[in-house]
Amino acid sequence: MKAGWDRHRGVFFKNHGVAWVVGILVVFFLAGSAFPQGPAPVKPSKKDKCPVCGMFVYKYPDWVGEIIFKDGAVAYFDGAKDLFKYYFDLKKYNPGKTRKDISAIYVTEYYDVKLMDAHKAHFVMGSDVYGPMGRELIPFFTQEDARAFKKDHKGKRILLFQQVTPGVIRKLDD
């Protein structure tokens, strides 16, 4: 009887064991894509100031942006516009750091008011919605949300992270 059980169990694990392994791998793959690739965002304290404009960031939770460095240092911003100013001129704002030292960049999504990976954001430029520092890049999780916002708020363009340039940022301040 034991030999029959072992044989049956062996067939069970041979057929079903592969399915279990594949299922577990699928779960890990799907879960891995839901988690941020860098460190988790960090909430600013009442003492944290934007290194670009000097404003206290905690007063504007709907607009917070942050750059987290590999050494654990965090720079907080009162909007995506100042975040990009800093990013494009690290030498001015943080002379000891380079882009290679950056571990993660987050911006606050407009509708959900949750921090998201800035590299995945769809930014609307030129809308009638203003941030703490005036005209602002408005971040969205999806292109559909960005399009709807652009239409409803007279936006001019939708840009991805890599399409934002120093020139785009200067136009927001004109």
Image (cartoon, rainbow, N blue to C red):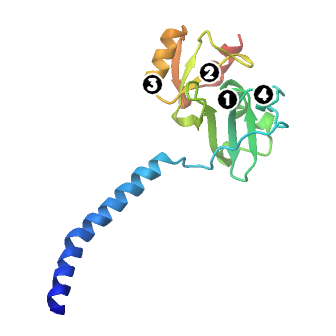
Q: Earlier in the sequence, mark 2 or mark 3?
A: 2
Q: Earlier in the sequence, mark 2 or mark 1?
A: 1
Q: Are marks 3 and 1 in contact (CB under 8 Å)?
A: no
User: Badge 3, how many Cα within 10 Å: few under 14, some, many 20+?
Assistant: some
Q: Amino acid at mark 2?
A: Leu
Q: Are marks 2 and 1 in contact (CB under 8 Å)?
A: yes
User: Badge 1, how many Cα within 10 Å: few under 14, some, many 20+?
Assistant: many
Classify mark 2: helix, strand or loop.
Answer: loop
Q: Earlier in the sequence, mark 3 or mark 1?
A: 1
Q: Earlier in the sequence, mark 4 or mark 1?
A: 4
Task: Name the residue beneath numbered marker 1.
Answer: 84
Q: Give me the C-alpha separation between circle 3 and circle 1.
A: 20 Å
Q: Give me the C-alpha separation between circle 4 and circle 3.
A: 28 Å
In the picture provided, is 105 more to the left or to the right than 120?
right
Q: Position of residue 22 (x, y in %)?
A: 30, 62
Task: Name the residue beneath numbered marker 2.
Answer: 137
Classify mark 3: helix, strand or loop.
Answer: helix
Q: Position of residue 78 (x, y in %)?
A: 73, 27
> Compared to 135, does 38 lie above or below?
below
Who's the residue at 40% across and 54% down the image? 29
In front: label 3 or label 1: 3
Task: Name the residue beneath numbered marker 3.
Answer: 143
Q: Amino acid at mark 3?
A: Gln
Q: Position of residue 170 (x, y in %)?
A: 69, 17
| Marking on residue 59 | 4
Q: Residue furthest bottom?
A: 2
> Compared to 22, does 51 lie above or below?
above
What is the tally of numbered marks visible in this picture?
Answer: 4
In the picture provided, is 49 more to the left or to the right than 99?
right
Q: Amino acid at mark 4?
A: Lys
Q: Amino acid at mark 1?
A: Phe
